[in-house]
C-alpha cells in the first residue's frame, strides 16, 4: 500500500491548515492510500546554515539534531508521496516549514520521483504567492507535481472556518484523487525511474 506524508506547517495543530490536509487524507484513505499527517509543532526550526556538513556525512541527515528536521526526513524517506501545507504569513509560507523543507531537501531526503503537492491556507490574500514559493523546491528535486481543479488553496481565518470553504475543500479532494491516480499508475506500470545524468553541469554567470 502506498503512503502519503502530509506535513502540517502551521503552529496551530488543529487549525485551518489541518482542515485542508484532513480533507486530502480522508479522500486518499477512501482510495486505499495510507496517510500520516505530521505536525511540525511550535518549537524553533533552524534555517539552513549552508555549512555543508550533511554532504560530508553522506547520511542524508542534517548535522543539527536539536529540532524536528531529521525526524521529518525519516518520515519523508518512508513515504511514497508528499503534501506540504502552510498558512500564509505576509504573502509567504510560515518560516518554520520553509526552513524544514530547505534543510531536508539539501541534506538529501529521498524525494526524487515521489509525487508532491503544496497547499496554502489564508484569510484573504497572498495565497498564490505562498503556494508558488512552497511548491518551487519540488521542481528542483525531480518530484512530479500533483495538480487539482484549481490552485491548492483554502480560505479561512479563525480555526475551523476552512470547513466553510466548499470550493477549497473540493479542490483538496480532487488533489487527493489525482494523487491516488498517479500513485496507482506508478505502482501498476512498474517502470523504472527516469534516467538522470550522472554528472551535474551546474554553472553560474560570474565569469
Image (cartoon, helix red, strand yellow):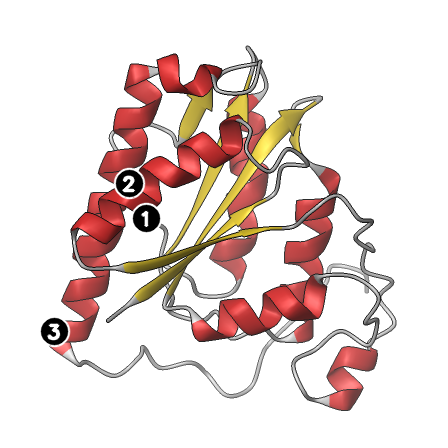
Whole-percent x, y for residue 173 in the image: 25, 35
Q: Tell me, yes or no, whether the two marked residues, 1 and 2, touch with CB atoms within 8 Å.
A: yes
Q: Give the mark nearer the N terminus: 1 vs 2.
A: 1
User: Residue at left 57%, top 27%?
Assistant: 129
Q: What residue is shown with label 1?
A: 146
**Distance in Å between CA atoms under marks 2 and 3:** 20 Å
Q: What residue is shown with label 2?
A: 175
Whole-percent x, y for residue 197 in the image: 46, 83
Q: Give the mark nearer the N terminus: 3 vs 1.
A: 1
**Element type at marker 1?**
loop
Tag nearer the camera, 1 or 2: 2
Residue 77 in view: yes
Find residue 129 and name its label.
none
**Distance in Å between CA atoms under marks 3 and 1:** 18 Å
Query: How packed is label 1: few (under 14 Cα within 10 Å), some, or many (20 or more)?
Result: many
User: Residue at left 18%, top 73%?
Assistant: 187
Quadrant showing the N terminus = bottom left
**Element type at marker 2?**
helix
User: Residue at left 35%, top 22%?
Assistant: 168
User: Residue at left 53%, top 60%?
Assistant: 140
Closer to us: 95 or 193: 95
Q: What residue is shown with label 3?
A: 188
Amino acid at each position: 500500500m502506498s503512503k502519503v506524508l502530509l506535513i502540517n506547517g502551521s503552529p496551530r495543530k488543529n487549525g485551518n491548515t489541518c482542515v485542508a490536509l484532513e480533507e486530502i487524507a480522508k479522500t486518499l484513505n477512501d482510495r486505499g492510500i495510507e496517510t500520516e499527517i505530521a505536525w511540525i509543532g511550535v518549537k524553533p526550526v533552524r534555517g539552513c546554515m549552508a555549512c555543508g556538513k550533511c554532504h560530508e556525512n553522506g547520511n542524508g541527515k542534517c548535522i543539527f539534531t536539536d529540532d524536528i528536521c531529521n525526524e521529518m526526513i525519516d518520515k519523508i524517506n518512508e513515504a511514497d508521496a508528499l503534501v506540504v501545507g502552510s498558512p500564509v504569513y505576509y504573502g509567504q509560507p510560515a518560516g518554520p516549514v520553509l526552513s524544514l523543507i530547505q534543510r531536508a531537501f539539501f541534506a538529501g531526503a529521498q524525494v526524487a520521483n515521489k509525487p508532491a503537492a503544496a497547499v496554502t491556507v489564508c484569510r484573504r490574500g497572498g495565497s498564490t504567492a505562498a503556494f508558488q514559493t512552497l511548491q518551487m523546491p519540488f521542481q528542483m528535486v525531480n518530484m512530479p507535481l500533483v495538480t487539482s481543479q484549481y490552485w491548492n488553496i483554502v480560505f479561512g481565518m479563525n480555526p475551523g472556518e476552512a470547513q466553510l470553504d466548499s470550493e477549497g475543500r473540493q479542490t483538496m479532494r480532487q488533489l487527493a484523487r489525482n494523487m491516488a491516480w498517479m500513485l496507482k499508475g506508478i505502482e501498476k506500470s512498474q517502470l523504472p525511474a527516469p534516467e538522470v545524468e550522472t554528472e551535474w553541469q551546474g554553472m553560474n554567470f560570474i565569469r
